[in-house]
Amino acid sequence: MGFGRGFDSRIPTQTLIDLTNGMLLRYDRNVKVKLSDLKPFASDPKAVDEILKTGDHVVYEYYENVVEGGFIYGVTIIYPGLIGEEYNFTRGHYHLRGDADEIYIGIKGKGLLLMQDKRGDFYSYPIERGYIVYIPGEYAHRTVNIGEEPLIFLYIYPANAGHDYESIKMKGFKKVILRRDGKPILVDNPRYRE
Ligand code: PAN
Ligand code: ZN
């Protein structure tokens, strides 16, 4: 079996990533997340409404392969931009299975990976070309593009992990990344609930 054919989970497979733009030669699905989808996750929902008056747009998208009983792996591309003062970010989620860890590998651009667990333990790590971040299953994770080009990273996690977005919608992340004086700063999220 060569490039571009469907994947059977129990035989070895291979594909290619274009490291200049993150495109996978072969993928099972592409999910595009728009600004309107991010409104419940934004630190400033009024800023979202303001931008939506002039139209909606894709903030980030991901392309992935799903191997049932194995891993899901793919590429996330977060476009540069701001939502009010907040840098473009992913919704963020907990995995439903606390033992489903994940690995992120930076390909291009400049970002921060925010991680927090349900006890309120919080970490912020850079994600850039060559950076590898290991995310234990109990930690919610959100990625933020703090650069001026698309932020591109690879991810790999168990296909049975499951995603909990509701907890993030309800409680938010402890900290958010805002642009102040042209630079990213980490500040307490005014909408965070313990
Ligand atoms: C990643 C994320 C991807 C988009 O594949 O799903 O970067 O982020 P949201 O799912 O939070 O919108 C991952 O962590 N999967 O488990
Ligand atoms: Zn995840």
Image (spheres, rainbow, N blue to C red):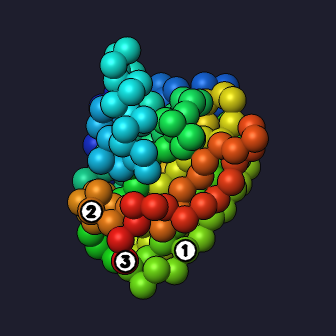
Left or right: residue 79 versus residue 131 is left
The residue wearing badge 2 is 170
Location of residue 107 by image quarter: top right
Q: Is residue 138 visible?
A: yes
- Looking at the picture, tell me which residue is in the foreground, 149 or 13: 149
Going from the N terminus, do you reach mark 3 or mark 2 first? 2
Query: Which numbered mark, 2 or 1, is in the foreground of this view?
Result: 2
Residue, x 37% and y 38% (percent of image)? 46
The residue wearing badge 3 is 194
Going from the N terminus, do you reach mark 2 or mark 1 first? 1
The residue wearing badge 1 is 122
Q: Is residue 152 visible?
A: no
Q: Disc 3, ligand 1: is the CB inside 8 Å?
A: no
Instruction: Count residues near mark 1 (Cα–Cα under 10 Å), then give few for <14, some for 14-19, many for 20+.
Output: some
Secondary structure of residue under mark 2: helix
Residue type marked 2: Met
- Looking at the picture, tell me which residue is in the foreground, 53 or 20: 53
Residue, x 69% and y 36% (percent of image)? 147
Residue type marked 1: Phe
Instruction: Count residues near mark 3 (Cα–Cα under 10 Å), then give few for <14, some for 14-19, many for 20+.
Output: few
Image: 21 above or below 146: above
Residue type marked 3: Glu
- CA gap between label 3 and label 1 equals 13 Å
Location of residue 183 by image quarter: top right
